[in-house]
Image (cartoon, helix red, strand yellow):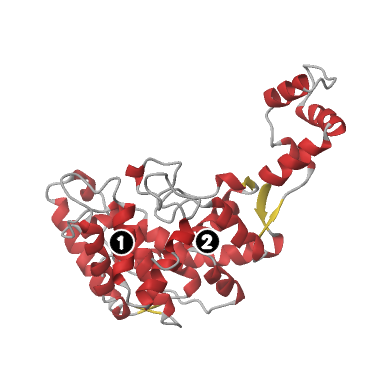
Amino acid sequence: MQGLEELARGKGHPNFPFLDAAYSPGSRVPCTDFTFWIAGRLEANDLTAVKYLMQQIVAGNPGLGVDGSWAADLVDFVVAMPLERYVGFSSTAAYFELRAILILLGLDETSDKRMRGFSLATPKGRTLAEIIACQCPRWSDDILHLRDQANTFIKRMRRDTPFWKEFPLFKDVLLPVRQETAIDMQFQKLTPAARLDLYLVSDHGPMQVDRLGSGGPFGRDTARSHEQLEALGLVATVRDEGAAVALWDKGELLELCGSLGISHRKGWKKNLLLGALRTARPDLVENRMATHAPIAVTPETANLVAGVRLHAEGITTACNLLLLA
């Protein structure tokens, strides 16, 4: 498959090359974000390649009593969705990306498409909104037909299921418009996984690179996310003293100083232990900083990221309904 093996090389599970090695194959977690590859294959009308990948991703857990053929059916289903009726973009490429995203968001499904309304009770709509907010979608009033469809499903479920009795009906649907800016175009260069990781760093402040990634349908390729975010100047490595101290807990520093014969006292705080380690073995501190130093959203980017995130909040309801298209 064109480019697929190269994208996954060195990242996958030994028995399932397109799945993350850190997760059980039954979790269906890809080893990297395949969105752009899928979008490219969709644009080339190479559905066979996309179906192959999806069947490989669910191979470790096709579902109870079914085989993996439903993953191929999902591809056909998403390709046939009349998305253009409900949402518009400034480029046709955005539609291929949207379909790729919807295919991956369908990884937790089975072959039964009759109950798609259950997606309303999942975070999929919010995830979709956060990913495509940078594409500045323009919404059609036809989205109100999806609202009526959603409400019909909720009312039907309320007859027998307590959960849905408390689930609110969709009433007013806001369809905010955002004009594309330079930060949106930067976001568009990022894989969906990297976009979500940028929000994660924005939410939590300085964090270690190995904490990136949700482990969801867009994989957990932390190195790839970090590379993209850093290359675009959206994040920077934090190398101050506080960041260095946070790289070890006190027990680790005590053990390390003891094993290296570095003079120290048990009652010393972490900053003193780190100072002793840096004096004796500066290379160890620098190596740890190089591989584990936290990253943070750059100050000049923070407010721009917040603006995209705010738009994502505004289009979440529309994205929830779009899943029913």
Image position of 158 with respect to 273: above or below:
below
What residue do we see at 34% from left, 64% from top? 102
Across and down, in percent, residue 146 comes to 25, 70
Across and down, in percent, residue 31 comes to 45, 51
Q: Quadrant of residue 271?
A: top right
Between 20 and 14, the one lying in front of the other is 14
- Name the amino acid type tagged 1: Tyr
* Image quarter in which the N terminus is found: bottom left
Which numbered marker is on residue 195?
Answer: 2
Q: Residue furthest top?
A: 266
* Image quarter in which the C terminus is found: bottom left
Across and down, in percent, residue 23 comes to 41, 41
Which numbered marker is on residue 264?
Answer: none
Image position of 176 with respect to 282: above or below:
below
Identify the secondary structure beneath mark 1: helix
Identify the secondary structure beneath mark 2: helix
Tell which circle, 2 or 1, labels the residue nearer the N-terminal end: 1
Across and down, in percent, residue 236 comes to 70, 56
Q: Quadrant of residue 107?
A: bottom left
Image position of 12 with respect to 233: above or below:
above
Residue marked by disc 1? 52
Residue 33 visible in image: no
Image position of 199 with respect to 241: above or below:
below
Q: What whole-number distance in Å separates the C-alpha atoms at marks 2 and 1?
A: 26 Å
Apparent side of residue 48 relative to residue 176 in the rendered image (left or right): left
